[in-house]
Image (cartoon, rainbow, N blue to C red):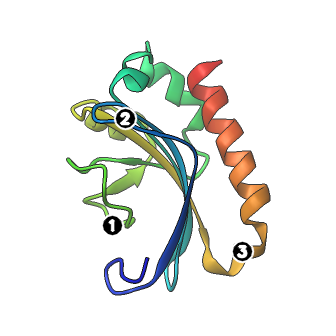
Amino acid sequence: GENYNGFPWIVLDAPRVFQKEDVFAFRSMLWWGHEISFTLHLSGRFLKEMKDLPFRLDSLINKDYFICVNDTPWQYHFKPENYLPLTESSIKENLKNDFLKISFKEPVSSAEEIPVTGIRIYKEVINALYC
């Protein structure tokens, strides 16, 4: 994309399912001048499958993950109105939403590591939620 809050960006959603009510997407986003982020986005049936969600997220606390606390899932900046560090209280704040976004960010200077970091983050988040 050419402009996200004034800076160019590029994304890769893989795997991805974007349906009217149901979303399962792992988004890798490079936002020039800001960061590289890796985000698991769930809504609809994919989120409803999560039983004991707060308990499942516990293993990601204190590992530099963030949780979206915004009322829209379509923002990707890491300002406090959008993302908070993943903690017990931020998990509870997110439970009011009909979606879940768990994100991890790296500096743009680590762009060469995108494939390795992306796979590691994907595995860690999926294992926390589904295993």
Q: Amino acid at mark 2?
A: Ile
Q: Position of residue 107 (x, y in %)?
A: 61, 74
**Which of the two labelled residues, at mark 1 and mark 2, occupies the earlier sequence position?**
1
Which residue in the structure is indicated by mark 2? 91
Q: Nearer the viewer, mark 2 or mark 3?
A: 3
Q: Please give the label number shown on residue 57.
A: none
Mark with earlier residue (2, 3): 2
Vertical placement of 94 versus 79: above or below? above
Badge 3 density bin: few <14, some 14–19, many ≥20, Cα 10 Å: few
Q: In this orientation, does residue 65 appear?
A: no
Query: Cα distance, mark 2 to mark 3?
Result: 28 Å
- Local packing at callout 1 (Cα closer than 10 Å; few below 14, some 14-19, many 20+) is few
Q: Tag 1, which secondary structure? A: loop
Disc 1 marks a residue whose amino acid type is: Lys
Q: Pointer 1: what residue?
A: 79
Disc 3 is placed on an element classified as helix
Q: Residue at x 43, y 24 (%)?
A: 46
- Up-down relation of residue 112 to residue 86 (above or below): below
What residue sits 31% from the left and 80% below the top? Answer: 5
In front of the other: 92 or 48: 48
Cβ–Cβ under 8 Å for marks 2 and 3:
no
Task: From the image, tell me which residue sits under label 3.
Answer: 110
